[in-house]
Amino acid sequence: MRAPTFFTLAALLDGPLHGYGIIKRAEGLSEGAVHMTAGTLYGALERLSREGLVVEEGQEIVAGRARRYYRLSDEGHAALDAEAERMSKAAAVVQKPEGVAASTARRRPAKAHPRPA
Amino acid sequence: MSGAERSYRIALRAFPKQYREEHGEEVIATILEGGDGWCPRLREFFGLFWAGIAQRSLAAGGVKTAGSVRAGIRLGAYFLFWLEASNATATLVHFHRYGRHGLALDVGAVVIGVTVLLALSRGWWAAPITLVLAWELGSAAFLGGSSRWLPHSGAGFIALWALAFLPALLCLLARPRKHEPRDLRSPLAAIAAPALGALMGWQWSALYTNLWIGLAYTTLLVAWLILGWRDLRLSIALSTIAMYFGLDNALRLAGDATIGLSVGYVERFAVVELVILLIAVVPIAIGFGGRRRRA
């Protein structure tokens, strides 16, 4: 799952949002790392809708313009959980507990430093 | 309607009609909500345009087709840049015909060619076209070179060159992903690029000497059949370079009185161009048609 897709799903965890709401929420959740254009967002939403991970949740007219809301489906929740689990396992590979990290460090070959004369 | 909205609506035309009717207003509203509404943002404009192209290819042929189209166009642009370097190298070998001026031009072109390949191998997609155009401009302005890619006169020439560069431009607009340059490092691309480049170069010189042109195209056809006509990427790449050389040669025929515009010569040129475009385009059509039926 690519970052824009992951954060699009994550943005909908707290409830339905419209397009611009998803962009801002994803930006906030990723601390500015993911800044989607509308093209990226709607490409992702189209794909996620087709896969059944996101569903449309009604629309409203604001200032004469259509605003459609999207929410996570049960499959979407499951996919997000699975991806989070996968990322957490991947992170655990490099972020080991204190003792393990220390022993790993000890196993690393020490760099050869020239001895002072 | 503000200028920004008008621009975004133009980019929105890249989407399929059905999608536009269903989501068009919503997409525009989302973009305008995030901007000042008057000045269009280039990132949004091109992002929307590319998303539309991707949406169209997805609608036509499934998930893998979008990647194939993008990779094919890039591969085509890669072949062109490779050819530029090959041509320059070939000219350099025979530099005594051109003198020092020509030597300076060709050394520059070779340097550009190598830099282009290095840039592409590192995934810097915007660098090649910038470098090559910079060299063409520089050589035309300061070295008295006769640029192959810059128009010599008239708006029609500019339009034709713009068309020839459209695939390369699309290649730049399609924001590359990290895994994509692997396509260009594959053994197939490594064999295909110099082979097609050399064949196209042969065909280019054949146009002037009026020799072997039919054989060059036959060889190209055979090479392509061996390399795999079922590969959508290669088909698109081939159509990209065929378009480029078709326009290049047409302009040369039209603009260079020394070549001679005998009727038989032009007809033969038109036929071989048509054949090469057909062999490139038909498999693309079959590929899309087949995928659509399966979908």
Image (spheres, coloured by chain):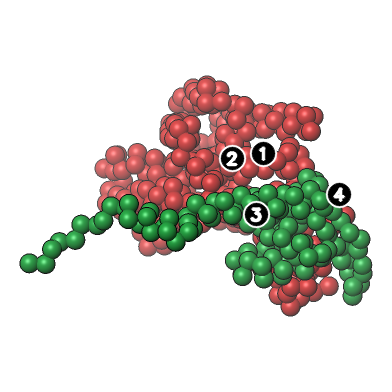
Chain colours: A green, B red
Q: Quickly name the residue at label 4.
A: B18
Residue furthest out toward the left: A117
Q: Are marks 4 and 3 in contact (CB under 8 Å)?
A: no
Q: Residues within 10 Å of mark 4 (few under 14, many from 20)?
A: few
Image coordinates for residue B172, horizontal then vertical, percent: 57, 54
Q: Earlier in the sequence, mark 1 or mark 4?
A: 4
| Distance of label 3 from label 2 (alpha carbons) | 34 Å
Q: Earlier in the sequence, mark 1 or mark 2?
A: 1
Q: Amino acid at mark 2?
A: Gly
| Distance of label 3 from label 1 (alpha carbons) | 26 Å
Mark 4, chain letter? B
Q: Compared to B242, does B41 lie above or below?
A: below
How many dots with numbers? 4
Q: Residues within 10 Å of mark 3 (few under 14, many from 20)?
A: some
Q: Quickly name the residue at label 3.
A: A84
Residue plotted at (47% across, 36% down): B186
Q: Amino acid at mark 4?
A: Gln
Mark 1, chain letter? B
Residue B235 disc label: none
| Distance of label 2 from label 4 (alpha carbons) | 26 Å
Of labels 4 and 3, the one closer to you: 3
Residue B64 disc label: 1
Regarding residue B204, the answer to whether it shows in the image is no
Q: In the structure shown, which secondary structural element does the residue marked by tag 2 occupy?
A: helix
Q: Quadrant of the C terminus of chain B?
A: top right
For this rendering, which residue is in front, B197 or B36? B36
Q: In the structure shown, which secondary structural element does the residue marked by tag 4 occupy?
A: helix
Mark 3, chain letter? A
Q: Residues within 10 Å of mark 2 (few under 14, many from 20)?
A: many
